[in-house]
Structures are given as C-alpha cells and as structure tokens.
Amino acid sequence: MRILIVGAGIGGMTLAALLKQRSYHPTLIERAPDFEHAGYMLGLWPLGYRVLHGLGLYEQFAAETLECRHYEVRDNHGELVKHWSMAPISDRFGPNLSCTRPQLIKLLHSAIDDLDLRFNTTLETLYDDGETATVAFSDGRTETFDLVVGADGIHSKVRQMIFGDQPYYHTNWGGWVWWVGLDQVPQETFIEHWGAGRFFGIYPTTQGAGVYAGAPVTDDFSQPGPGRTQRIRDRFAGMGELVETCLESLPDDNSDLFFWKLSDVRAKEWTRGRVVLLGDAAAGFLPTAGIGASMAMESAAVLADELSRTNTQFLEHALALYVKRRQHRVESTQNDSRHLAKMMFIKSATVSHIRDVATKFYSLEQLAGSIAKAFDEPI
C-alpha cells in the first residue's frame, strides 16, 4: 500500500513508526526544514505513550522525562486554591510524563530512520479519482498513492483541500511562551495561576520549565517589539513570588518569543475517498487538559491497526472503521478541554472568585470527566 503522510508531527511520526513495524514504507513530507524548532513543552498521558511500549521506545522516553506527580491551582495573587495528587491515576494507569515536543519528535524519528522523510516539502494539489490519489509537491514532483493521511496540524492544508473551511473554536485568549531554569521552580508539579483576566502556567521538563502567560487578545498584550517585556511584567505583577521569578527570565524585546493563540478546530468529516485526517488536522486541542498529543498518538495506533487488516480494495471501509472508533472519543475529550478553558480563562474578578471557591471541591476526575473516563475505555 502506497501511503503518504502529510506532516511529520507527533501523530504523523507515530503512524509512520507503527506502519514501518508492520512492514509498510510510507512517505512523509514536512514543511519545516528540520526538527530543530519543533515546539515547546507537553504532558503525555498513558493514553498516548502506551504506543511507545509496542515500539520499544518507552524505557528511553521515561528516562528522559519528568513525572508530573502533583497539580496545583493558585489564585490571582498566588495563593493555593487546590492541590491534587496524580497518584490515583498514575498508580492505576501510569504517570503523566512531561517532556518537550522536540524530545518526543526526535524519539519517534529514531524509529523511522530509513523511511522517505522529505523536509521543506508541501502539498500543492491533491486529486482523488476513486482508485488512487495523485499528489503534486512543492519540489515539482508528482506521485500517486493509495492513501493520503493529513497529519498536518490545526491549520491543515489537506483538510482545507478536501473538506473546505471547518469550524474553529476561539477562546479569544492567547499567551507568550518561554523557558525558565528548572532550578527556579518546583519539580514534578504543574502549577497554574487562574487569575482574573490573566493566566500563568508553569510546566517543568528535564530541559527546563515551560511558562505560558495568557490573557485576552483584545488589547496590546499580544503585540511584539518595543515594550513587550514590560507589558508582560505589568500584566502578571502581583501573582506571587513564583510568577515574579519566572518573569525575571523573560527574554528582551528583541528576542523571538512565541505567542500562542488558544483556538481549536473540529472537522465534520474525517475521511473521504482515499484521504483521511489524523490528530490536530481532524480535531485540534486547546492545551488546557494536556491531552492533544496523547489523542493523536492513540488515533495513530487505531489507524495503523485498521490499515494492517485491509488492502487497497477495501481501504475506504477500513477508514470508516477508524472514524467510528475514534471520532466520538476524541470529540468528547475535546469538549472537556473546552470546558476547562471556560473555567481557566475568566475576565471578571467576581466570577473568578466564585470559580476558585468551587474548585476547592472538585476531584481530579470531576475536573476532566471524559478524560478520566477514557483511561478505562477500550479504543
């Protein structure tokens, strides 16, 4: 089976590694020139990294990551609202492991070393005649495949080509991301400050702690250039000593700093003919539950499973089964991440105070119902 995977991100790389294990030799294309700027921090639940056991990569992954043993929510002034131990989940299913996206990408890359991976390459045209899919690439080549997998992220070109515009969900919040030294923050604890009109999250990895400083994007908070550092420091002043420590590590105004707008997307259809969507291309995730990468890896495992039990003649039926196994589960989890965003991102001081009081009574399972339930459901 001739398979093209568009996008060498977490979903695409996981699928490629699993297909190679089944003696397929997919082609991957990636618009970036390399993996050197592959992203920031992420948490991986056992839902996703179970795949690494089958690829023989889990032990290396676990050795290179930090276990998130605790999760804390603090208020607008840095006072503790609620502390949760992750033990009820980790003892039964496995820990939440915190890493950088480049760490995971490079690990997955090690499992596909001899596959055809083309950097600096994009899709220009895609024509599905019902029997094959003919693709023209940005390097001038035209090739024919039995299956095209769109794993090209939240702004998927494959999705746009096949399904047209799909509905985005906008929180109208966004934030700046930077790194601080691991010695400056508590290790093994994810800490989030749920403020009024501001949010500050600190997520340790073995490479340092990733910081996300978020607020509504309706003013000059999101503007780069002169005054950026001071605007960020002013916005998050008074959130406590830990936040102040992180603000001291802010790069200067002339440094590149990533601004992450908090939006997601949901495709109404995941497959048509010989084209199928995977990961964020099918259903992108807000970072609020730290579940997007895990869902992409789980979906890759299901798609590889269905492809291993079919041939080109009955390919469309296999893709339909993949959608039946995945779409409801993914969208339910996506709904939870949206619900968490509504809890985390509140402008009103009064409403945020009510939220903080209510949060004291939440269990970890209640905070993210579908996500917790998913640990004990088959895929």
Image (cartoon, rainbow, N blue to C red):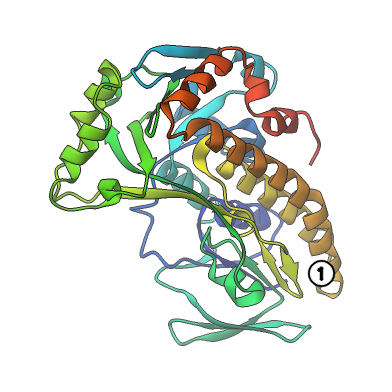
Residue furthest out toward the front: 350
Q: Can you say which quadrant of the picture contains the C terminus?
A: top right
Residue tagged 1 = 315
Quadrant containing the N terminus in the rendered view: bottom right
In the image, is residue 307 above or below residue 127?
A: above
Residue at 53% across, 59% down? 153
Question: Is there any visible trace of residue 29 in the rendered image?
Answer: yes
354 lies above or below 199: above
Q: How many marks?
A: 1
Q: Nearer the viewer, residue 158 or 165?
A: 165
- Residue at point 37% right, 22% down? 76
Determine whether, in the image, residue 52 is placed left or right of residue 109: right
Depth check, front residue: 48 or 111:
48
Image position, residue 103 (x, y; %): 42, 42
Q: Quadrant of residue 48?
A: top right
Q: To which quarter of the image does residue 366 belong?
A: top right
Q: Report the residue at 68% width, 63% height from top.
A: 24
State left or right for residue 130 relative to residue 33.
Answer: right
Q: Secondary structure at mark 1?
A: helix
Residue 121 horizontal/vertical position (percent): 44, 73
Q: Amino acid at mark 1?
A: Leu
Q: Residue at x 33, y 41 (%)?
A: 177
Q: In this orientation, does residue 251 appear?
A: no
Q: Is residue 15 placed above or below 252 in the rendered structure? A: below
Residue 78 placement, left or right of 29: left
Crowdedness near tag 1: few (<14), some (14–19) or many (≥20) residues, C-alpha within 10 Å: some
Identify which residue, 196 or 261, lies in the foreground: 196
